[in-house]
Image (cartoon, rainbow, N blue to C red):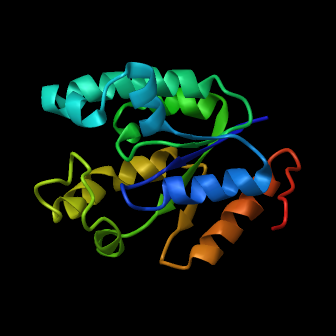
């Protein structure tokens, strides 16, 4: 069975929706950033202190590992799309879903957050969105807008997932 791979900006809801989706579909959930830190025995912040390139190399190693899974929900880091290799690995065994949340809606969600790329300048979210939007759209098999309607986004994710090999969600 294919993996369901969630891509999008930091703060768009990849991990939140991924956990819920996995629970409803009775599939394992993996947050790529958490898996990276566990497998590398090092924090993302420490990689960024060295260089963004060091982090991106570790991210590619982690995504190669996750891409080998079968039937999992995977939430990637927001910048996974920056390397074509990452997306080729993930698309080979999965369907890629872009959760599109506009920067102005993300800002309220990340207050107090310590994401390395946003730590010093919260306005940078607008620049990152402009830099990455074409990549997100290019790699997405499906685009779901997140305008703050949590239930609506989850419903659309479940509908999309049910089309994959006849998956059926569990009602709670």
The quarter of the picture where the C terminus appears is bottom right
At x 43%, y 50%, the residue is 136
The quarter of the picture where the N terminus appears is top right
Residue 126 lies, in percent from the top left, at: 23, 64
The residue nearer to you, when weighing 31 against 155, is 31
Q: Is residue 22 above or below residue 64?
A: below
The residue nearer to you, when weighing 80 against 33, is 33
Residue 5 lies, in percent from the top left, at: 59, 43
Q: Is residue 107 above or below residue 91?
A: below
Query: What is the number of callouts on the image?
Result: 0
Q: Is residue 73 above or below residue 102?
A: above
At x 61%, y 70%, the residue is 153
At x 39%, y 47%, the residue is 135
At x 39%, y 30%, the residue is 37
Q: Quadrant of residue 109?
A: bottom left
Q: With 54 as the anchor, is 18 left or right in this view?
A: right
Q: Is residue 169 above or below residue 105?
A: above
Residue 14 lies, in percent from the top left, at: 50, 54
Residue 85 shows up from this direction: no
Q: With 171 as the anchor, is 160 left or right in this view?
A: left
Q: Quadrant of residue 151?
A: bottom right
Residue 59 lies, in percent from the top left, at: 38, 28
Residue 69 shows up from this direction: yes
Q: Quadrant of residue 53?
A: top left
Q: With 52 as the anchor, is 161 left or right in this view?
A: right
């Amino acid at each position: 069975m294919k993996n369901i791979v969630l891509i999008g900006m930091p703060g768009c809801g990849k991990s939140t929706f991924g956990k819920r989706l996995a629970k409803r579909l009775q599939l394992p959930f993996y947050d790529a950033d958490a898996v990276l830190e566990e497998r590398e025995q090092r924090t993302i912040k420490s990689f960024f202190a060295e260089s963004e390139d060091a982090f991106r190399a570790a991210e590619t190693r982690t995504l190669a590992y996750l891409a080998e899974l079968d039937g999992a929900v995977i939430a990637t880091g927001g910048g996974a799309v920056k390397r074509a290799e990452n997306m080729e690995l993930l698309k080979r065994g999965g369907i890629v879903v872009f959760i599109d949340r506009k920067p102005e809606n993300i800002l309220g969600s990340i207050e107090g957050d310590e994401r390395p790329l946003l730590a010093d300048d919260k306005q940078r979210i607008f620049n990152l969105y402009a830099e990455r939007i074409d990549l997100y759209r290019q790699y997405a098999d499906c685009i779901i807008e997140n305008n703050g309607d949590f239930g609506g986004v989850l419903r659309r994710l479940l509908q999309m997932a049910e089309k994959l090999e006849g998956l059926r969600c569990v009602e709670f």
